[in-house]
Amino acid sequence: MDSKQKRALIARRIAQELSDGDVVNLGIGLPTMVSNFIPPGVNITLQSENGFVGLGPTPAPGEEDPCLVNAGGQPVTILPGGAFFDSAESFAIIRGGHVDVTVLGALEVDAEGNLANWMVPGKMVPGMGGAMDLVVGAKRVIVATLHVTKDGEPKLLKKCRLPLTAAAEVDLVVTDMGVFEIKDGKMIIVEKNPEFTIEEIQAATEAELVVSPQLRDMDVSGL
Amino acid sequence: MTCGTPCGLVEELAGSGAKDLTIICNDTGLMGDGIGMLISTDAVQHLIASHIGTNPETGQKMIDGKIQVELVPQGTLAERIRCAGAGLGGVLTPTGVGTVVAEGKEEIQVDGRTYLLEKPLHADFALIKAWKADRKGNLIYRKSARNFNPLMAMAADCVIAEVEEIVEVGEIGPDEVVTPGIFISYLTRRSN
């Protein structure tokens, strides 16, 4: 599976977690791809933390509006029925529990539901932006990440080593190797990529995996 | 990243030779653009922002010790500015509990949940951007360029609004006004 297929697998699987009527915030990058795979009949409202709901697709070339961008500064559109607001109201929506699901990337995530995704001391300090509020405030936190780093190191750890974005807030982790529920300090594998055995997945994971009795295969067709 | 930034005012400030400024903003724009203009001209001594990743120059100057950077979660930044404008002594937020953001801050339990006490952020000057103003300073904004502007308009001694259009009083209906003109000290027009 190449990198593009892995990312599509993760995004498509997360899209199946969304329910009709959900208010959803998608992070920049891989999480944004989730919106390409929303199942038919499921209508969701996308929230953009820089100040609106009703986030629509990328505009056609030449149709960009410098006053209408997503949280990463990229040109976007707003759908009929959308609404603009200021940053305090935007984060009241986020912190106040009015976002049903947030999907974010990870540098590290662990079995206690801790997430680190905003800095590497001495190397990369972009800032947390809205991530800390999203992870604390959203009803459900889903992490979208490749299973290992570029160097092949595990990202699903016993305990995060990098500075945390939030403590014990992650509910579900979806990678190219499987789907992992975080519950009571345990990382439970509930679905696996059929290209790998449980042993192979465990070998690429620092956290100790608990295998769900209902373990299923991920759908990897048509990627 | 520069959406909602009063780029005309920022450019004037960057060209004015001002130094040792404390800047409160969401992000430092792009290299040499938006707030990035102030970073390039070494006008900033202390920066309070939620994100600097889109402008590598800020990160470099932070590492070199030229700029002191305080990173604040975006929602906390918005509330700290809002509570300064609203006359509140601070805000209790669950954001940042259990992270480096909590270091040195008072933790307060309310009904069994832990919150951080985050204090107000007030400024001497607010430079804000709006779409339209009437001559009383009533403002409306355009799309996602609203962001921090209505909050900053309440939280400074002197508030200067850069707008694209200035209309007569009455042309913006009272129901449409987002920021009441009582907050605004000066208007300047800059057409796009």
Image: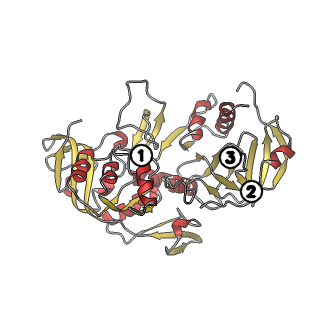
Of A36 and A110, the residue lying toward us: A110
Give a yes or no on whether discs 2 and 3 share a subunit: yes
Earlier in the chain: of badge 3 and badge 1, it is 1
Disc 3 + disc 1, Cβ < 8 Å: no
Q: Secondary structure at mark 1?
A: loop
Task: Give the answer, above or below, for where A38 lies relative to B151.
Answer: above
Give me the disc on residue A101.
none
Picture coordinates of residue B52 (x, y %)? 44, 52
Dot 2 falls on which chain? A
Amino acid type, label 2: Lys
Amino acid type, label 1: Gly
Q: Quadrant of the C terminus of chain B?
A: top left
Task: Give the answer, above or below, for where B3 lies relative to A42.
Answer: below
Within 10 Å of disc 3 (Cα), the crowding (few <14, some 14-19, many 20+) is few
Q: Quadrant of the N terminus of chain B?
A: top left
Picture coordinates of residue B116 (x, y %)? 50, 69
Q: Which residue is mark 2?
A: A183
Amino acid type, label 3: Thr
Q: Which residue is mark 3?
A: A149
Of B5 and A54, the residue lying toward us: B5
Dot 3 falls on which chain? A
The CA distance from mark 2 to mark 3 is 24 Å
Disc 2 + disc 1, Cβ < 8 Å: no
Picture coordinates of residue A184 (x, y %)? 75, 60
Q: Which residue is mark 1?
A: A51
Picture coordinates of residue B182 (x, y %)? 19, 57
Of tags 3 and 1, the one toward the viewer is: 3
